Amino acid sequence: MTPRNSRLKALLKPSYGPNDLAALADFFAEHGTLELNVKPNGLYSAVTADRVVSFLGYGYTWIRDTIMMTHYQMEIGRHSIARTTLATLRNYFDQHRARFIDIIEGKSDKNDPMQRPHIRFDGNALEEIDETWAHAQNDALGYALWMVFLLANRGEYRLTEEDCDVFALFPFYFESVEYWHDRDSGHWEETPKIESSSIGVVVAALEQMRRFLLRQPAPVFRYAGKKVTPARLDELIARGREQLARFLPYESPPERLADAALLFLIYPTEAVSGAEADRILDLIRQDLQGEYGIKRYLDDSYWCADYKKLLREEERTVDFSTDLERRDKLMKPGTEAQWCLFDPIMSVIYGRRYLKTGRSDDLQRQIHYFNRSLAQITPENFALGGGQCPEAYYIEDSANGAYVPNDHVPLGWTQANLGTAFEYLKRSSRC
């Protein structure tokens, strides 16, 4: 791939030494490529620029995106920022704990997404947004639980009584919605279905919580007189694992096979490894990898060709979860947006393998996907800023077929993934 930013042409290499990495670091610093605009309370907007993006909805905070950015901070050793983020998320869940309790006690209809805990909210006031949204997203809640116990298990987050009180609700909530066959809207917030990527994240979260509970002495997690025990978690985990065994390497067969969200079960959650991970990677390469990035899934109509011509500004990011057919009618075959989230994750996956195996083919794949990630960085003359991390490339005008970055720049999730890929490339270079 040829970099969109001409200054990167000289910096993109078939292999990277210390001087090459230093030159890249200088480029990133000059352009603020990896600078995440963290709020004082530790939360993030989806688009991390200072400019106003509320008209897109991307000025709000998403739990899932926030956890991905928090994990990046953890990977580069900024644990104090990560701790602040998790404490604020805990406060948000506590402030709206009735959402969990009413589902657990059967007072709310779990089939109504608006009754579920809200995964997109005002990150400044920690308030819910009065707007219909596909809040049935088990993966988002799973990521939050997973991150808390991942850091706790590493000794980087010390759980308080408030943490124990709030996070005790999560296993009971996942049990109440029967997450192993719950039809949720998942990573892409679209038509509800049973999805491997959601189930796998919850499994990873429960496994981290179980690991923590096996420590001695362990705090008590209890709701309404019922304790969260390793045995209770084992049962919940087994149900999820059974469904994954039926579905993987596919997302939601037979309606959805390849889906790039499955990459997150390999990294960062490590819910899947070995041969199953290889099958997922092969499927992504064969079915979803494009010249400019990686598609979320086949026939994805979000930011399809002519998207800005076909939809008014206020229509582009609305909740399509109950009416996806309307947007899908705009889709021309083969014009899916190609996203920038996934190439850096592919690079990290192969980089982690290289650190374990020392195999040259793993290193070459790590560099290949890192270079694809660099090639996606916005050109100097891009209206929203050169040297930035976009959400995706899409066909702005089907008359000429040219791919350009969409409006969501810089996307924090892409920044976090590229930053993590850069961190692992530095680690590989020291081997």
Image (tube, rainbow, N blue to C red):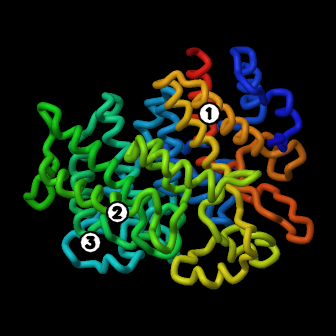
- Specify the amino acid type for callout 2: Arg
- Residue 246 image label: 2
Q: Are marks 2 and 1 in contact (CB under 8 Å)?
A: no
Quarter containing the N terminus: top right
Q: Quadrant of the C terminus?
A: top right
Choose between 112 and 38: the one closer to the eye: 112
The Cα–Cα distance between marks 2 and 1, rounded to whole angstroms, is: 30 Å
Q: Amino acid at mark 3?
A: Ile
Which residue is disc 1 drawn over? 366
First of labels 2, 1 by sequence position: 2
Furthest residue to the left? 225
Q: Is residue 331 above or below residue 59?
A: below
Element carrying mark 1? helix
Q: Is residue 306 left or right of residue 38?
A: right
Instruction: Specify the amino acid type for callout 1.
Output: Gln
Residue at label 3? Answer: 103
User: Which residue sits at x=36%, y=70%?
Assistant: 116
Q: Is residue 359 visible?
A: yes
Q: Earlier in the sequence, mark 1 or mark 3?
A: 3
Sequence-first tag of 3 and 2: 3
Q: Mark 2 or 1, which is nearer the eye?
A: 2
Q: Which mark is residue 382?
A: none
Q: Residues within 10 Å of mark 3 (few under 14, many from 20)?
A: many
- Against 10, residue 3 (above or below) is below
Along the viewing direction, whichever of 188 and 382 lies nearer the viewer: 188
For label 2, count other residues whose C-alpha is less than 10 Å away and answer few (under 14), some (14-19) or many (20+).
few
Q: Label 1 vs label 3: CA separation? A: 43 Å
Query: Image check: 183 left or right of 239?
Result: right
Whether 107 is drawn above or below 289: the answer is below
Residue 428 x, y percent position in the rendering: 58, 22
Residue at point 65%, 59% (across, down): 295
